[in-house]
Amino acid sequence: MILLVGSIVTAALFARRNVKSGRGDRRGAVRLGFATLLLACLNFLLDSQFPRRIDLAWESLSGAISVSLFLAGLLWLLYLALEPIVRRGRPQSLVSWNRILAGRWRDPLVGRDLLIGSAYGAGMVALVRLEFVLPAWFGLPVPRPQVEWLEPLGSANGALTQLIGNLLAALLLGMLMQFFMSFAMVRREGQWLGFPIFLAISFAVFYVGSLELALPLRLAFTAALSLVWTHLFARRGLVAGVAAAFVLQWRMPIVLDPSSFYAWTSFVMTLALLAIPVWGFRVALGDRPAIGGAGGGA
């Protein structure tokens, strides 16, 4: 919460300065905010059961609109604040992101970052899953899976709501972490000082969100996740970070029993998750064939 409030205040100051000086990608910020608003409103419509009383329905609707506007405004603010800083110090971090905002979804660089980010996210998910394995090896209590991980399996609306919610959370987390990285690396000669700063912020974020494990294991898992996360944002950029954050939030079990009533929902959700790296791989190839060469003569 302290990091979030501090980020909002700092972003507001920098965004105000950028607007007054005529810097910043205002069109991209508006597109990002508008897309966030649409996704947040759609998420609410799919997830809500409107009460029959008009006053309660209006209260629910106004609350959802308020939250949606807050998320849209926050992402708009963060992007307007960080874009000039990143463009000046680490412009390669926003190249694929700018191409997405320009509608160039099939750009090979966009596909590359989606694929790399998904790979990072899958590796981090595998690391998180070890939290249920390693404690037993050391004779320590094994954490219990959270009940809310199973809720999206109950209905198609719940599954779609989970996907949209994960995307919104990935956008927010990716933008926040890029914001922190931008300020950590604001001076090129101070990059080596920026790495530990960003690593410390990542450690705090992952420690708060980690499971209740024995302290040595919890510290070890948090440190490993923070190192991978820092390497991702230092070497890649915003698109790869958002893709990794989206995959990292995958908590729903993959159902292998086709007779289960929720097997179809699990199957569709898994396909939706795999669509990102598959799309990234195909787009990253450009005009090259996925298998084999362009053909050869006899």
Image: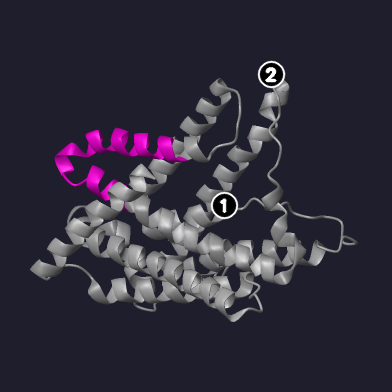
Above or below for 229 versus 149: above
Mark 1 crowd level (few <14, some 14–19, many ≥20, 10 Å Cα): some
Q: Amino acid at mark 1?
A: Gln
Task: Please tell me which residue lies in front, 153 or 49.
Answer: 49
Q: Is residue 186 left or right of residue 115?
A: left
Query: For residue 156, what is the image quadrant?
Result: bottom right
Majority SS type along the magenta span: helix
Quarter location, residue 81: bottom left
Task: Identify the residue position indicated by label 2 in the image.
Answer: 138
Residue at 46% x, 73% y: name it.
65
Residue 204: in magenta span: yes
Residue name at image x 23 percent, y 47 percent? 183
Residue 6, magenta (yes or no): no
Name which of mark 1 and mark 2 comes first in the sequence: 2
Q: Amino acid at mark 2?
A: Phe
Residue to which mark 1 is pinned: 249
Q: Quadrant of the N terminus?
A: top left
* Direction top: furthest residue: 139
Q: Determine the secondary structure under disc 1.
A: loop
Point out residue 123 in the picture as x, y percentages from the top left corner: 56, 44
Expressed as whole percent of the image width and height from the top left, the position of residue 239 reads 41, 60
Q: At 74% from the left edge and 61% from the top edge, which residue is drawn?
A: 153
In terms of secondary structure, where does tag 2 sit?
A: loop
x%, y% of residue 285?
49, 67
Tell me the magenta residue range. Answer: 179-205
Closer-to-camera residue (105/142)? 142
Q: Spot the residue most to the left.
A: 21
Distance of label 1 from label 2 (alpha carbons): 27 Å
